[in-house]
Image: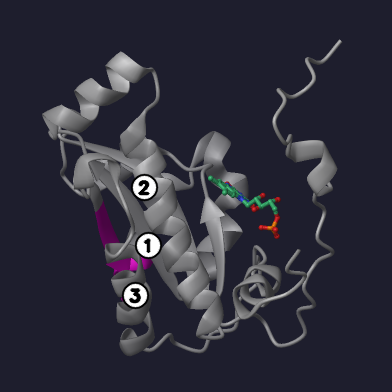
Amino acid sequence: MPVDSRFLELCRRRYSVKRFSSRPVERQKLRLCLEAARLAPSAENAQPWRFVVFDDPDEKDAVANAVFRGVYSHTRPLARAPVLVALLLKQSIVVNQLGGKVQGTPFQVVDAGIAGEHFVLAATEQGLGTCWIGWFDSRALLRHLKLSRRAFRAVCLIAVGYPAGDLKPRERNRRPLEDIVCWNRPPETPP
Ligand SMILES: Cc1cc2nc3c(=O)[nH]c(=O)nc-3n(C[C@H](O)[C@H](O)[C@H](O)COP(=O)(O)O)c2cc1C
């Protein structure tokens, strides 16, 4: 069994960074992460993801003001990251939506998750910190972008920046493989 690889090392290095340095993020690095996302697989190769990158401080603050209000305000500190990336889904791709309905799996959301994690791992490799943000006002984001909810879904935001200098990676808190993998048998049903 392979116990280590460069890819595993990269996976270990990634963690959710919640405090960022004010150092701006180079566009070149962001483009590399976006290219990694572009190469992600998707159901029917529909590529339903759209990334909106906010690296202009005023534009980013305007988004943060819109989406981290009320019940969402406790996620607001993540908007101190120099970059916020909005991960959107273009909803009008009929094949993908139908497939999801028939199969019962929202493939577009799966697609977005894969592309987003490509982005995140590429960012880790570039020395950048990231944090997925699911707790934000997704409707407010679409309103802010003047996009209709019929055409787009706002899946997540990703905070991106250099980790604050004194930050130590948190302990990995993961179930052991034995808990999550079954070889040739179904998982046990919880009592
Ligand atoms: C889809 C998704 C949504 C998340 N939303 C938030 C969030 O709104 N706020 C937050 O602080 N962390 C959020 N996280 C980060 C998780 O809490 C974190 O990934 C998890 O605790 C494991 O920690 P690690 O990323 O450091 O390994 C989110 C992660 C994912 C994958």
Q: Is residue 24 above or below residue 118?
A: below
In terms of depth relative to the viewer, which is nearer, 118 or 77? 118
Q: CA distance from mark 2 to mark 3?
A: 21 Å
| Residue, disc 1 | 85
Residue identified by numbered label 3: 55
**What span is colored magenta in the figure?**
50-61
Q: Nearer the viewer, mark 1 or mark 3?
A: 1
Q: Quadrant of the N terminus?
A: bottom right
Q: Dot 1, crowdedness within 10 Å: few (<14), some or many (≥20)?
A: many
Q: Which residue is mark 2?
A: 112
- Which mark is first along the chain, 3 or 2? 3
* Place of residue 94 in the rendered image (x, y in percent of width and height, measured from the top left): 13, 28
User: Within 10 Å of the Cα at label 2, are there few (<14), some (14-19), or many (20+) other Cα atoms?
Assistant: many
Query: Closer to the camera, 131 or 19?
Result: 131
- Rendering coords of residue 170 (x, y %): 80, 66
Residue type at mark 1 is Val
In space, the residues marked 2 and 1 are separated at their CA atoms by 13 Å
Asked if residue 35 lies left or right of residue 12, the reply is left
* Label 2 or label 1, whichever comes before in sequence order: 1
* Residue type, label 3: Asp
Q: Position of residue 83 (x, y in %)?
A: 42, 72
Q: Amino acid at mark 2?
A: Ala
Q: In the image, what residue occupies the spot 58% across and 50% down?
A: 75
Q: Closer to the camera, 75 or 50?
A: 50
* Image quadrant where one finds the C terminus: top right
CA gap, disc 1 and disc 3: 8 Å
Nearer the observer: mark 2 or 1; the answer is 2
Instruction: Say which label, 1 or 3, has the lower sequence index.
Output: 3
Outermost residue, top direction? 191
| Residue 111, quarter of the rendered image | top left
